Amino acid sequence: MSLGAAVVFLPLIASAIAGFGHRLIGAKAAQAITCLAVIAAAVCSVILFSRVALDHAVITQPLLTWITSGDFTMDWGIRIDTLTAVMLVVVTVVSAVVHLYSLGYMHEDQHISRFMSYLSLFTFAMLMLVTSDNLLQMFFGWEGVGLASYLLIGFWHHKNSANAAAMKAFIVNRVGDFGFELGIMLTFWITGSVQFEAIFAKLPDLADMQFIFWGHSFHALTLATFLLFIGAMGKSAQLGLHTWLPDAMEGPTPVSALIHAATMVTAGVFMVARLSPMFEAAPDTLAFVTILGALTALSAAFMALTQTDIKRVIAYSTMSQLGYMFMALGVGAYGAAVFHLMTHAFFKALLFLGAGSVIHALHHEQDMRHMGGVWKKIPITYAYMWIGNLALAGIPFFAGYYSKDMILEATYAAGPGIGQFAYWAGIVAAFMTAFYSWRLLWLTFHGTPRMDHHTFDHAHEAPKIMWMPLLILAAGALFAGWWGHDYFIGEDRFEFWGNSLVIGEHDIIHRAHEGPHWAAYLPTVMGVIGIVLGIFLYGRRRDIPGKIAHKFALLYRLSLHKFYIDELYNKLFVHPAWRLGSFFSGSDKQFIDGIGPDGVAAFSERTSRRFSRFQTGFIFNYASIMVAGVVLFLGFLLWTYWS
Amino acid sequence: MNHWPLISFLVFLPILGIVCLALHPMKSDCQLRFAKYFTLGLTVVNFAASLFLLKDFDTAQTGFQFVENAPWWPSLGLNYHVGIDGISLWLVLLSTFLMPICIACSWDSIQHRLKEYLMAFLLLETMMIGAFVSLDTILFYVFFEGLLIPMFILIGVWGGPRRVYASFKFFLYTLLGSVLMLVALIALYLQTKTTDITVLMNADIPGNIQLWLWWAFFISFAVKMPMWPVHTWLPDAHVEAPTAGSVILAGVLLKMGGYGFLRFSLPMLPDASIQYAPIVMALSVIAIIYTSLVALAQTDMKKMIAYSSVAHMGYVTLGLFSFNQQGIDGAMFQMLSHGIVSAALFLCVGVVYDRLHTRDLGRYGGLVNNMPRYAVVFMLFTLASVGLPGTGGFVGEFLSLLGAFRANTMYATLATSGLILGACYMLWLYRKVIFGVLDKDDVKAMTDLSWREILIFVPLVILVFWMGIYPTTFLKPMQPAIHQVIARLAP
């Protein structure tokens, strides 16, 4: 088995053994197998990364034919270039950390083997997604991670809210996949293939191609990329298809860290980066991506301001950061987007797992209104949260600083109009990000303890198995930006990326470096202001936030109720679908059956009953009808005779 | 080709079984058990024999294989003419594969008139295989209609409380179609002076006659499919039928319609098919959306799956009438995968129905706690039903949509929305039955899958994944035959 195949299939094998065989081999062995398999995959990934990204080899390995039908051919295969190698490292490293952390976090759950099996299954699907050399296998991984996400959100299946959230996640993602699948079909019909290499080779001929869709003529590539992007919107929780992500926090916290922060939700970003040659040929789609990314970054940060559930704050923060990544993609800074994807994976997983340690310490309390004052009790977690938040806020020399600044500079360089809009949206969001992060820190760790005595007294630092693995993530949050910026967005970027994504003739990153100095400093300044204000409002003057909420009641409610988007969707889609279903169900009975079989049956029954009235059983009735018949018959004969 | 008459063996072995059963006394428990083992063994032998078809099938050849041709009614020119191509090969295999499963799943649940029950199933097998292998229109008609009798009896005798209503509705609907088909077959004979399907598939029939004949065939096959709006017999039939009856109904009988389109309408009446394709596609799209919505509103588990069947068969007609390789490959594949998946889903319902004797969603909940194995199996088939890539459900759905997209982007887009709706009702069903809190005492007392049930499900699970991961096994033999059909449709 080659190294690439090992990375992909080890987690699958482990998942199957743990899932189906845990009764046979015991829970401990099942947990050990999943952890070892993913750690082995992580080690292999690092080796692959050095071979592919640093030594510039591209690995391709066909596995098995999949679907062949007419001129449509599709094989299972593995393809590893720099972009994939980066994703491999991110996915397997974070996954390995989360696997280890889960051993401690889920220690008391009797279904821990099943949990570990799902985590490994997720890892496999995500790896299939990133190693695919074609759209359809990518779709396989895409739906596979959706399935794992569904299973893990609903892991505590006795909770009704968890079941609802799981279903919602799957269905909202399906809405995205609906676009993705149409996009795949359209791509196939215009390029004759779903293989990335073959699609890209065809692109120069298609620059001006039109496609008739629903009777209207569209620029073919714009339409195809737009449809594909709907898929990315669903998976990466962009505004409009984001409603599932906050609810997904019903799942256990390690799941939130791995799936709903570090890896799965970045699949949309990966997809656009992977298809960058295609998107590059569709400027209208790119403009849409930028605007949507900017709006998502801004609105999600706004919604995060008022949430009281610690995990939901981080969830909205994730959504907001994904918005940044799409902004970068939209202006053509693909390298910067993937760079932010990587740094974000480290610091956001760290934040989530840190939050998990807090929740663990406080007997599964997630509401920040019932926290506070515990920083001395859980100092390691406290330190981790600081590191994560500093990286998130983009404070210099932490990981987020390099990637977020680059994104904002690139949007500024993209010029007036959309680029400027994205830049300023990003600046405001950067301020809010820093603010809500320190709100979270102070509400959680400082001030007077607001939980009951028992909980406070028993608050304790997480066991070693939970805090040790986080060192890796903390190291990533501290050094990944400093280490990577030369490769991802710096001098070495051409050599590093090779052909795996478009850097473009109008190299936006190059232009970004030439922008004004203030545009580069402003994000950091806004971050610092946000931090200071956060500490001031939630550390010194706890009375002010309430007053602000009271004064700007409308804005406060909009933020708290997430712009009422869930309520709107329920009114627009969910209820009408049910009502229509019931109506049609009734019309099947009343209308179709009423006219069809039941109607025919009733009619024939009525008719025969009418005819049966003639059978009265009285001789004189029969005799008189006979006489009438004879008279009529004779009359008819006479009439024909005379005429 | 010199070959022992394998096809006749497949068709008539069940008849032999019926004779044996008829002579077998059913007094003691021991004799009853023997009858069950005997029938099971017979169906397994038949399945094993049908595997020889697959083994010796030449995938490179386009024509019919394993052909047997003998005069049957010489004065009318009727022949006992049978044979298979890549299309009927898989449908025969599907029938012989599901038959042992049907017998095994009725093992304990049928207590009353067991002998007649087993005989009805064997008769059903003869008729199904016969219909798929017939190469003579009248022979086909005999089998096609003959099917109705055992199915009618199965629903009417071993069905639920409203079985009489359901069986008559089923009979009336299909009879309407059959009568029209008989007229069409006679007209076809008068026009061409032959009843040989292989000849008719290449015959040139004048355009205006094609149009009339097409409608007669269409109504007949649309009822079988079933297509909207002649689908209302299906939910009732499924709800009232015993589990094994539902399995065969969903697994094989619904495929008669698709097979009919592929064998009669498309190759024999190509001009009319092209002309009316937009109507069929529109009806398919309505079926997909309408019945998916209806499925959402159901509280009866079997009704829900029955409506989902109508939606899934919508993809079949959509793919068939897009007239390209992807579309028809997809339609054919969808028929096979639906045959497996819906059969499995009805078996899943049967498992809990055998224990609690209700199909009401609200009565269940929390089964994952006391029936974990069942939860896994049900999950797998739920996923296959929503068309998750890697399961058989995806390949057929995707290919038929891909084909439809080339033919008409609007219908394809609307049909693709079925992906969303399908996920809605299936996950809702799963959630209500499997997840939640286990609080009802009688539900708590339910036991997990027995070994017999596991053995029934294992082959189905393997097939679902096989079809999803390596569909080439199934696609390759059917493609030459489909290619020929498309050649007929080319202008």
Image (cartoon, coloured by chain):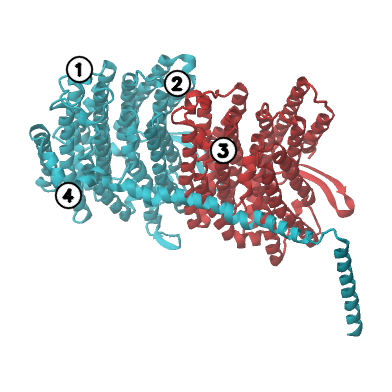
The answer to which quarter of the image holds residue A57 is top left
> How far apart are labels 1 and 3 at the CA level?
60 Å
Output the chain of dot 4. A
Residue receiving disc 1: A457
Q: Which mark is residue A18?
A: 2
Output the chain of dot 1. A
Residue receiving disc 3: B471
Output the chain of dot 2. A
Q: Where does the image place residue A571, in percent across and percent down from the top left?
A: 37, 50
Circle 2: residue type: Ala
Q: Nearer the viewer, residue A21 or A557?
A: A557
Chain A representation colour: cyan
> How far apart are labels 2 and 3 at the CA level?
27 Å
Chain B representation colour: red
Circle 3: residue type: Pro
Q: Where does the image place residue A342, in percent across and percent down from the top left?
A: 27, 34
Q: Nearer the viewer, mark 1 or mark 3?
A: 1
Residue pictured at 64% horizontal, 37% vertical = B247
Disc 4 residue crowd, few under 14, some 14–19, many 20+, Cα 10 Å: some
Q: Is residue B407 left or right of residue A497?
A: right
Residue receiving disc 4: A424
Q: Helix, strand, or loop for circle 2?
A: helix
Q: Is residue A280 left or right of residue A76?
A: left
> How far apart are labels 4 and 1 at the CA level?
46 Å
